[in-house]
Every structure is written in structure tokens, then in C-alpha cells.
Image (cartoon, coloured by chain):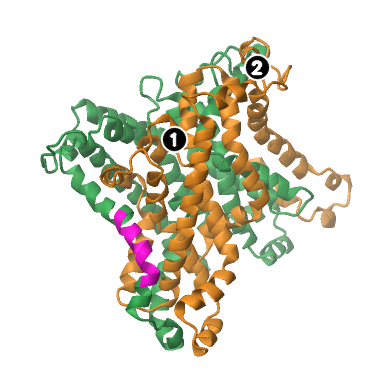
Chain colours: A orange, B green
């Protein structure tokens, strides 16, 4: 690994020192290209295995490409009453979309208050909210299970939509963004007699579209991929979201990996598509969430 | 999601003080608002925050002081007994708990160095424009957007002792088949490699952002001084990345210490509970056997351990930064 780390800087300005042929061989690109291929391989195996027949995955000879491509695995899993993948998919869509909307509404308003309004107790609230960023989520698992059960939400989508929206990340993230916006526009609008709510809706929200898009994507992805919490709070087969649902495939189909990989592919396709069309927002969001300030 | 933020939260905390003091004088009209208006904006979030973050923190501690069987009506108060049981050992619960702490520590020690070095190498290699750079970056990052259940099933297949892809190729090349998912030390490989594949891209993205903040002039100056590539990496890149490195180290240690899906799905704790992580243990004890009192005590012990680790990492950040500036 250490050679990999040191090699690249050597080629930042090779032409200046050695105009010879060495700089012509794009070692960096070859190295990265091969590594990227290696990173893609597991995904390619998932895709190809999902298109094999049950017989083919269990035979002695494996090949990267399916010998006789079939949608057998998909058909088997989409019709199964004990493993209703299409229902899990729908549940996950509802949960992830629902939580994203909830976070956008609630966190945007709270972040605006913390960034722009002065009111009694603001410092304490801000400090409390930020401090909980350090609280490991595991310490909330057991008590939140009891609370959700008291609310009658066990085995319902409310359990995977609402509690997760209380996290401090969205508020923190947007508050940082709002603090970076110039106040002049709001001052002008106030002088014109605009209400606080109108300012929020017509100035702040439109100006914050990129930040809101980033937060929406990160929230959607995190909810879609959440595993630990839904695994315990949902239990009926038809109520599961896709991640805990997938984990039941292992016991349902044991080594019928064509069918299991079909389930994996179904769960992966929406997030991969979402990532491909929005990778700039996702990647910048993570870089910014980590580094801002 | 909370894992994305710990370090950044330190800077804003200072800003709160600054902002709170300054703003009323600088732009009073914009800041001024009635309590009603403020409540309208922050109220909905506060309700959620109090119910699902603040209250559970206290409630969890309260539960840990009881013999709290979720399914039984009586939940007798036992004081610190759950903690005493855990810390003094002797019971089977405490034995499995400390085994799971050990397994988690082993996983963390094995995975964190790789999760620092590979992403840093990738970031340095990608920190220069070349055709296809964004595509390559997307490929390294892509596994991260897949949920851990997909990662688990996929690698369970690739590593399957009998019909798995990797063993098929080992066989083909004349090696013996390896029981990756059932025998030590292979089980650790079966947890670390998928984790590396899954999350290296995440750390890489943060390193890349950090690299872009290092001024190009520093590299030029170093080159004029005759520094070779290793020296430039050692004396410009690494010091410039120090805060980012500490941040990535912190979130990576925390993420590894909270490992759950990989051992739950890939090794299923095998062999004989050896790879059962502490989160698996807490879930099992509290939400399958419903011994919530002892499970909450386990959570508290783990939480304290994680807070200590974060504090140590963050203190590095605070101590080193002023020295850097003085130089």
C-alpha cells in the first residue's frame, strides 16, 4: 500500500524533469483502472448470478457469465408469499420517502430558527442538539424500542420513519448552510413587511436547494440501507423493509444463490441509479458534512 | 448518519458562542422574533428530538438499573446490579458480553488500519485530473450506497465454503478450499475484506476533499527545495491532512466498533460465537431475549468506551493544531 501512496505525487509534474518516455506510460491510470475493475467484480458477480438458473449456481463449474441467462431467480422471488420482495421494496420506498420529507420539513425549520432567530433558551437547545451528535446510536436502541412499543408502532412503518428523523445531523447540516447565507436579503424583505414565514418560504428555501437536495439524498440512502433498527422493530413478512427482508432470504433459500442474488439486485438497483444520477450531491455532501467548519 | 459529523461539530460549537454574542448587535432586525414564531419553527423538531433522542438517553440509563424483562409486568429496581454482574463476571451473560467486546476489538484493530491506508492511497492517486477520474471515483464509492444486507448476502455467496466463487477459483488454481465463514482465522478475513470494499470509498471521499484544501504552492515550494515525491507526501500532504486524518480515524474506529451486519450475515457469529460483535450481543440480549436491563447496561458500557475513544481522538486534534500554526 505504501508504494501506492507514494507513487502518485511523483507524476504530478513529470514532464519538467524527465521528458523521456517514462511519463508516457500512464501508470496511475493503469493502477486505478485495475483496482476499479477489482471493485466492480463483486457487483458483476451479483448481477450475473442473479441471471443464472438454480441448477447452474450449484454445479461444479462456475462461469462469470450465465451460460443460459434466465429470470428464474427473479420470478421465484417476486411471487413468493414468505419472502414478498416487491412488498419490501414498496415498504422501503414509503419509509425512505416519508422520512426524507419529514426530515426536510422539520430540520429545515429548526435549523432556520437556530441560525437566524433569537429566542430564550436558544443556546441551550443548540448545544444539546449538537452534543447528541456524539451519542452513539446504540445507546438509543433499547429505550427507543420500548418507546415505539408504547406508541403502538412496533411492526409498522411509523417505527422506521419517525424516530430516525429526530437525529441531529440534518439540523446541524442545514444550520451551517444557513449561517453561510448573507442576511441582506432577509433584512430587505423584513423592511418590506414580509412575515417570517414568507421570508423562510420565498427566500431561504429556494436559496438552499442544493443543500436540501444533498440532505434529502443522504437521508433517503441512510433509511433505505438501515438494517439494525428495522430488523428488530418489524417482524411480519409483509411489513419488512428491504434490508431486513433480504436477510431472511438466507434461511429461506439457503444455497440457492441465484434467487438470493436476484433479491440483492432488486434492492441495489434503485440506490445505484439514484447514486449515478446524483453522485455529485452525494459525494460533496459527505465531504462537506465531514469537513465543513 | 450521525457518524458523518463528530469532528465538524466541534467547530460549530465555538461558532455558537461567537454567533450568539455577535449577531444581535450586527443584524438585530433579522434576529428579532417573537417566542411564538421561534416555537413555530423549532417546535416540531423539538418534539421529535425530545421523544426519540433526549428521553431515550435518560430512559436507557433508567432501564439499566432494573431487572427489566420487556414481556413481564414486574420490573424490579436492582440498582447497579446489572453493571456489577457485567463487570465482575462469573455469569454466562457477562462472559458472552466480554467475548463480544473482544471480537469487536479484534475486528476494529484489523479493519481500521486498512480503512485508513487504502482510502488515503486512492485519494492521493485520484487527486489529479485525468480522463475518467470521476467514473473511477464513482466506482470506488459505489459499494457504499448498497445496504449492509446486500453486502452481507453478496459476500456470503462469494466466500461460501462449498459453492462460493472465491473457493471455486482457489480450487481451479490447485489450492485447498478455505472455510472462510466458519473457521478462524479466516472468519476475520471474511469480515474485514467486505467491510474494506464497502466503506473504503466513503473515507476516500473525505480524504479527497481534504487534499483539495492543501495549497498547490506548498507542493511547488517543496519541489523547488528539491523534495522528492516521498518527501512531499511525508512533509506536505500528511501534515496538511492531519485534521482530516484524525476525523476519518475517529469515525472509522466508531463505525468498526459498531459493526453489526457483517458478522450477523456473513459469519453469523461463527465459530462458536467468536465473531459475535457487541452490537449483535446487545440486540440478542435486549430485543430477542428481552432482558432489557442487562442489555441497557451493556449499551452504557459500550457507549462510555466509545465516548472515551472519541475524546482521545478529538484531543489529538485540539493539541496538535496550535503547534502546527506556530511552526
Give the number of the disc on residue A240.
Answer: 1
Q: What is the chain letter for disc 1? A: A
Residue B326 x, y percent position in the rendering: 50, 70
| Identity of the residue furthest to the right in this view | A20
The image quarter containing residue B66 is: top left
Residue B185 seen anywhere in this rendered image of the structure: no
> In this picture, is A56 found above or below A109?
above
> In this picture, is A42 found above or below A200?
above
Cα distance in 3D space between marks 1 and 2: 27 Å
Residue A163 seen anywhere in this rendered image of the structure: yes
In the drawing, does residue B248 fall left or right of residue A278?
A: left
**Segment colored magenta:** B40-51
Is residue B224 covered in magenta?
Answer: no
Q: Main secondary structure of the magenta part?
A: helix
The image quarter containing residue B271 is: top left
Residue B178 x, y percent position in the rendering: 54, 16
Element marked by disc 1: loop
Work out whether residue B233 or residue A270 is closer to the camera in this orientation and state it.
A270
Is residue B46 covered in magenta?
Answer: yes
In the drawing, does residue A194 fall left or right of residue A59?
A: left
Amino acid at each position: 500500500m505504501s508504494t501506492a501512496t507514494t507513487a502518485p505525487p511523483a507524476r504530478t509534474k513529470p514532464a519538467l524533469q524527465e521528458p523521456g518516455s517514462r511519463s508516457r506510460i500512464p501508470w496511475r491510470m493503469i493502477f486505478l483502472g485495475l483496482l476499479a475493475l477489482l471493485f466492480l467484480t463483486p457487483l458483476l458477480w451479483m448481477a450475473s448470478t442473479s441471471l443464472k438458473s438454480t441448477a447452474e449456481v450449484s454445479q461444479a463449474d462456475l462461469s462469470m457469465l450465465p451460460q443460459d441467462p434466465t429470470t428464474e431467480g427473479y420470478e421465484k422471488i417476486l411471487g413468493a408469499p414468505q419472502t414478498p420482495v416487491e412488498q419490501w421494496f414498496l415498504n422501503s420506498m414509503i419509509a425512505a420517502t416519508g422520512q426524507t420529507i419529514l426530515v426536510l420539513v422539520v430540520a429545515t425549520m429548526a435549523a432556520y430558527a437556530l441560525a437566524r432567530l433569537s429566542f430564550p433558551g436558544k443556546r441551550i437547545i443548540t448545544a444539546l442538539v449538537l452534543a447528541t451528535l456524539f451519542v452513539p446510536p446504540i445507546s438509543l436502541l433499547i429505550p427507543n424500542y420500548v418507546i415505539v412499543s408504547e406508541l403502538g408502532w412496533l411492526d409498522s412503518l411509523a417505527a422506521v420513519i419517525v424516530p430516525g428523523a429526530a437525529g441531529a445531523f440534518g439540523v446541524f447540516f442545514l444550520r451551517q448552510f444557513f449561517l453561510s447565507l448573507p442576511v441582506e436579503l432577509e433584512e430587505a424583505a423584513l423592511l418590506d413587511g414580509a412575515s417570517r414565514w414568507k421570508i423562510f418560504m420565498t427566500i431561504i428555501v429556494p436559496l438552499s436547494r442544493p443543500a436540501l437536495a444533498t440532505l434529502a439524498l443522504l437521508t433517503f440512502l441512510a433509511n433505505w440501507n438501515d438494517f439494525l433498527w428495522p430488523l428488530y422493530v418489524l417482524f411480519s413478512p409483509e411489513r419488512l423493509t428491504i434490508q431486513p427482508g433480504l436477510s431472511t432470504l438466507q434461511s429461506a433459500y439457503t444455497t440457492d444463490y441465484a434467487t438470493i442474488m436476484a433479491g440483492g439486485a432488486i434492492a441495489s438497483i434503485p440506490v445505484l441509479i439514484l447514486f449515478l444520477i446524483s453522485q455529485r450531491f452525494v459525494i460533496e455532501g459527505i465531504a462537506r458534512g465531514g469537513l465543513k467548519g | 448518519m450521525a457518524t458523518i459529523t463528530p469532528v465538524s461539530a466541534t467547530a460549530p460549537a465555538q461558532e455558537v458562542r461567537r454567533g450568539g454574542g455577535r449577531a444581535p448587535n450586527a443584524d438585530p432586525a433579522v434576529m428579532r422574533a417573537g417566542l411564538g414564531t421561534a416555537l413555530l419553527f423549532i417546535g416540531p423538531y423539538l418534539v421529535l428530538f425530545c421523544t426519540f433522542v433526549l428521553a431515550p438517553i435518560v430512559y436507557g440509563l433508567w432501564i439499566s438499573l432494573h431487572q427489566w424483562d420487556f414481556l413481564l409486568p414486574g420490573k424490579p429496581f436492582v440498582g447497579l446490579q446489572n453493571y456489577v454482574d457485567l463487570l465482575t463476571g462469573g455469569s454466562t451473560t457477562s462472559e458472552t458480553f466480554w467475548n463480544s467486546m473482544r471480537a469487536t476489538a479484534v475486528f476494529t484493530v484489523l479493519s481500521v488500519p486498512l480503512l485508513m491506508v487504502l482510502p488515503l492511497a486512492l485519494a492521493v492517486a485520484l487527486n489529479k485530473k485525468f480522463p475518467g477520474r470521476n467514473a473511477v471515483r464513482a466506482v470506488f464509492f459505489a459499494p457504499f450506497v448498497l445496504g449492509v444486507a446486500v453486502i452481507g448476502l453478496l459476500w456470503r455467496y462469494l466466500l461460501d465454503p462449498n459453492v462460493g466463487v472465491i473457493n471455486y477459483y482457489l480450487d481451479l488454481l490447485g489450492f485447498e478450499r478455505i472455510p472462510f465463514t466458519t473457521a478462524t482465522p479466516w472468519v476475520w478475513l471474511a469480515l474485514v475484506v467486505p467491510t474494506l470494499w464497502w466503506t473504503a470509498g466513503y473515507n476516500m471521499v473525505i480524504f479527497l476533499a481534504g487534499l483539495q484544501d492543501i495549497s498547490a504552492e506548498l507542493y511547488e515550494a517543496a519541489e523547488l527545495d528539491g523534495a522528492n515525491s516521498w518527501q512531499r507526501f511525508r512533509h506536505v500532504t500528511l501534515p496538511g491532512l492531519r485534521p482530516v486524518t484524525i476525523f476519518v480515524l475517529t469515525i472509522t474506529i466508531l463505525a468498526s466498533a459498531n459493526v453489526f451486519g457483517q458478522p450477523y450475515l456473513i459469519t453469523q457469529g461463527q465459530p462458536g460465537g467468536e465473531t459475535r460483535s457487541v452490537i449483535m450481543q446487545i440486540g440478542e440480549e435486549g430485543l430477542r431475549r428481552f432482558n432489557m436491563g442487562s442489555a441497557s447496561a451493556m449499551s452504557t458500557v459500550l457507549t462510555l468506551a466509545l465516548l472515551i475513544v472519541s475524546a482521545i481522538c478529538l484531543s489529538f486534534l485540539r493539541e496538535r493544531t496550535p503547534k502546527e500554526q506556530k511552526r
